[in-house]
Amino acid sequence: MAEDKDSNEVADLPLKESCDYYVYEYYIKESEEVFYVGKGKGDRAWRDSRNFECEKIKDEYHWEIRIVKRDCTEDEALRIEKDLIEKYRKDGVMLTNVMPGSVKPTEKETIGYVKYLAFLIEKKVLNISNADIANLLLINQTVVWNIINTENYADIDTLLPENINEIIHKYHVNAYDEDQIKVGNIKYILNLMEKGVLKLTQSQLAEFYEMTPSNVSSIKKEHTHPNIPMLIPENIGEIFKKYDVFYVSEEEKIRGMIMFILRLRNEGTLKMTNRDVGKVLGVSDYLVAEFNRSNEDRKYIFKEYRPNEEIMAKLASYFVIK
């Protein structure tokens, strides 16, 4: 009987809560910038995908995983995760976590969030798909459809998401999707090209945005996306640096010097053959000949570039003395 009593006493003891959870964060290797905080156990940090914004960063940058705290209970991990996210957000770090503080929502809370977003869709405040809602709340798209389109959840109250500010900014009715933003950016850059503010060709613009030159041409002619306005690219500073109108490449310098020398030759100031020009500039006389085409629409035209003192000295013997 004593043995049975001991067995019952053991059975009545509360089970020790598992401490196999941990808190982790994803960060960009080069800048050490944290972009996602999560909790999990086993190999959770190394498997499965997260939300769209998180996966986009993972695709575009070299990133690493850092374990912040090990050997936690699930509640401890949730608390640490929530505190860490709140700290980062307070410090201005732009995390990609979609749930506020990454607090694990109950089923009723999730349903309430979906119902509130559906309310904003009905009032034409948001333009968000069921798939986006499912991704935002980490639930199945079919569940979202059922919540919005059936009466199965009529007794559950509508609930305002804590991260409503982020949701509205991202999915408001006047928001543009990724492709539309790209079109607006291209329109903006084309306008700067026409004004002579940026120095690049439509082919270079197409290459920068990973599309074909014909796509850019169609956008320019308003054959496609006529209703998309010009949108300033987020990386406009990078574009200005890459296509600085005052920057002269070595290739442009060579061609500009050819234009300069040929003009002086045509004016009778210099007496040189194409081979002489090529010899002075260290280029092929065939390249020089390209600037002498009789067909104007095929002739090379570049902005003149005055040669440096060394090249001007080489030209001295070709000047015509009058």
Image (cartoon, helix red, strand yellow):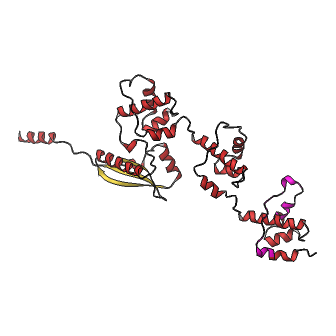
Q: Position of residue 225 (x, y in %)?
A: 66, 37
Q: Is residue 85 left or right of residue 60?
A: left
Determine which quarter of the picture holds residue 182: top right
- Highlighted magenta segment, given as a residue range: 287-312
- The residue lying at 47 percent from left, 47 percent from top is 54
Q: Position of residue 26 (x, y in %)?
A: 43, 52
Q: Is residue 104 visible?
A: yes
Q: Is residue 135 above or below residue 39?
A: above
**Does the magenta portion include 70?**
no
Q: Nearer the viewer, residue 201 or 87?
A: 87
Q: Position of residue 267 (x, y in %)?
A: 90, 66
Q: Is residue 136 left or right of residue 269?
A: left
Q: Is residue 247 above or below residue 196?
A: below
- The residue lying at 90 percent from left, 65 percent from top is 266
Q: Is residue 168 left or right of residue 11?
A: right
Picture quarter with the C terminus: bottom right
Q: Is residue 107 above or below residue 257?
A: above
How many marks do you count on the picture? 0
Q: Residue furthest top?
A: 151
**Does the magenta portion include 307?**
yes
- The residue lying at 77 percent from left, 76 percent from top is 310
Q: Is residue 5 above or below residue 23?
A: above
Picture quarter with the N terminus: top left
Q: Position of residue 244 (x, y in %)?
A: 67, 58
Q: Is residue 114 left or right of residue 80?
A: right
Q: Residue furthest right?
A: 322
- The residue lying at 77 percent from left, 75 percent from top is 309
